[in-house]
Amino acid sequence: MSDAGLRAHDLVIGYETPLTEPLNFEVGPGEILVVVGESGCGKSTLLSTLAGVTAALKGEIYSGDRCLNGVPIHKRNIGLVFQDPLLFPHLSLLDNIGYSLRASGQSRDVARARSQELLDWVGLGNIVNQKTWELSGGQAGRIALARAIAAKPAVLLLDEPYSALDSPTRMRLLADVKDLVSLEKIPTIHVTHDHGEAQLLATATLTW
């Protein structure tokens, strides 16, 4: 469980040209910062920078007291959920969820117990034997969320993960996100173009 927040200090994102003015924000354990803006405004670039895929042009990123500048992506302890769930078709649902735990050296039994806990929490414990290609879009989204938080990341980043789903399904999934993030006390950043999502999820908003 996360015991520290995420903080950006005078953060400037972009590639050769800055996409924003310096950004300053802090997201505490269990809080959700929703970044709202139209396509192309830099929302995904912000997540890419926080994850370590793209270098910041200026400024610092902190997870607790740890400065993440220059820290490679695999050492940042960050959970990511994209619009495409990116589930592994050759793995069971439990092993999909527990993938990060196994990759970090946890035993199969520990990984499966944690995966079953999360599978039950997202309401899919009764379909444990289904294949990934048999899942609905909403079910796949729940598995992707469970996988992202299975290893108790220091930060969770959500890049419009449910934007392709119908509105009722999307809102149910976002309610699951809000509850699970609060339960696990994970600082979370969610980017979207939808102000309704911001109203549902946000502890705080950043609008571009």
Image (spheres, rainbow, N blue to C red):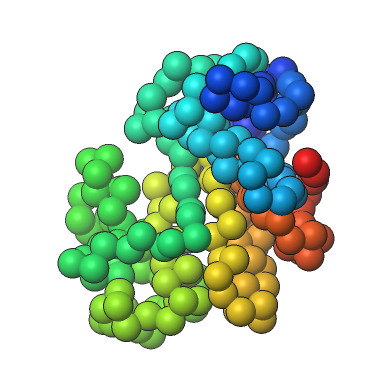
Name the side, left or right, on which 69 lies relative to 113.
Answer: right
Kindly identify the residue that appears in the image at 79 percent across and 60 percent down.
195
- Tell me if residue 146 comes above or below residue 127 in the rendering: above
Residue 112 lies in what quarter of the image? bottom left
Toward the viewer: 45 or 205?
45
Q: Is residue 107 above or below residue 46?
A: below
Q: Which residue corresponds to the image point at 64% horizontal and 66% vertical from the top-left?
A: 174
- Report which quarter residue 64 is drawn in: top right
Q: Is residue 168 visible?
A: yes
Picture quarter with the C terminus: top right
- Image location of residue 178, percent across then percent down: 66, 60
Q: Would you say residue 172 is visible in this rendering?
A: no
- Please report the residue visible at 38 percent of the width from the left and 24 percent of the height from the top: 72
| 22 over 82 or under it: above or below | above
Give the percent coordinates (x, y) of residue 69: 51, 17
The number of discs equals: 0
What residue sits 36% from the left and 60% below the top?
86
Residue 179 position in % (x across, y down): 64, 63
Across and down, in percent, residue 98 comes to 31, 57
